[in-house]
Image (cartoon, rainbow, N blue to C red):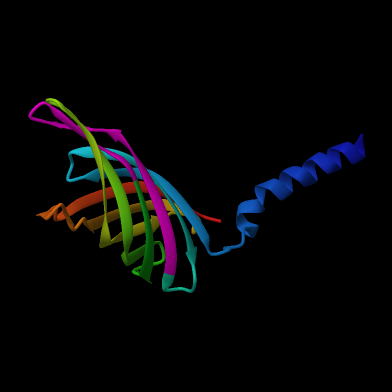
């Protein structure tokens, strides 16, 4: 009985101290919500690797969850995939500022008023934001990114401004 009690107590002590023993592997991830000009909303996931204290590479993907309706036509982001280089700088013990630049591919669909079509757009994306960590491993991230979608069929599509907010975790 004493061995079982000791084993249970040891296991609980080991599990309780696990966060304190966690090693920062450089890998981080997150999930959040992205809005495109506060019209459409997407669920966004991110996976990155911190190369050093100031430079990271990250990939992200998004799937539209709330679409916009203009003049009886629904507009939705079907998906988005991107790869970014991120430069960061600590602003305090718990707040980090960052800037990033990368490449993104997005597909949007329109439906209504006799239109049912989808189109892919790709181009440079750039922006920045703030990340707050409450324990060195978990936190929240607020970010602005501008996506340059270039032109389609000779028509300049321009840029789309996005804001995202999400949970982030270092592994």
Q: Name the residue at 91% across, 38% down.
A: 2
* 162 with respect to 73 (left or right): right
Above or below 100: residue 151: above
* 44 with respect to 47 (left or right): left
Q: Is residue 8 visible?
A: yes
Q: Name the residue at 58% across, 63% down.
A: 25
Residue at the limit of the structure toward the front, as seen here: 153
Q: Position of residue 29 (x, y in %)?
A: 47, 53
Q: Can you tell which quarter of the image residue 84 is in?
A: bottom left
Q: Quadrant of the C terminus?
A: bottom right
Q: Position of residue 115 (x, y in %)?
A: 16, 30
Could you say which is closer to the camera, residue 61 or residue 29? 61
Overall secondary structure of the magenta section: strand
Could you say which is closer to the camera, residue 59 or residue 52? 59
Span colored in magenta: 56-79
Q: Can you tell which quarter of the image residue 126 is in?
A: bottom left
Does 57 lie within the magenta span? yes
């Amino acid at each position: 009985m004493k061995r079982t009690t000791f084993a249970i107590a040891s296991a609980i002590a080991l599990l309780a101290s696990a966060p304190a023993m966690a090693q920062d592997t450089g890998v981080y991830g997150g999930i959040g919500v992205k809005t495109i000009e506060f019209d459409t909303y997407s669920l966004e996931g991110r996976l990155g690797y911190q190369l050093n204290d100031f430079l990271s590479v990250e990939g992200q993907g998004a799937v539209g969850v709330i679409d916009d309706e203009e003049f009886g036509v629904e507009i939705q982001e079907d998906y988005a995939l991107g790869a970014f280089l991120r430069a960061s700088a600590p602003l305090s013990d718990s707040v980090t500022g960052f800037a990033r630049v990368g490449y993104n591919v997005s597909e949007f669909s329109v439906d209504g008023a006799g239109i049912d079509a989808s189109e892919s757009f790709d181009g440079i994306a750039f922006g920045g934001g703030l990340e707050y960590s409450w324990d060195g491993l978990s936190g929240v991230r607020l970010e602005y990114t501008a996506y340059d979608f270039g032109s389609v069929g000779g028509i300049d599509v321009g840029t789309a401004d996005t804001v995202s907010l999400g949970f982030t975790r270092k592994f």
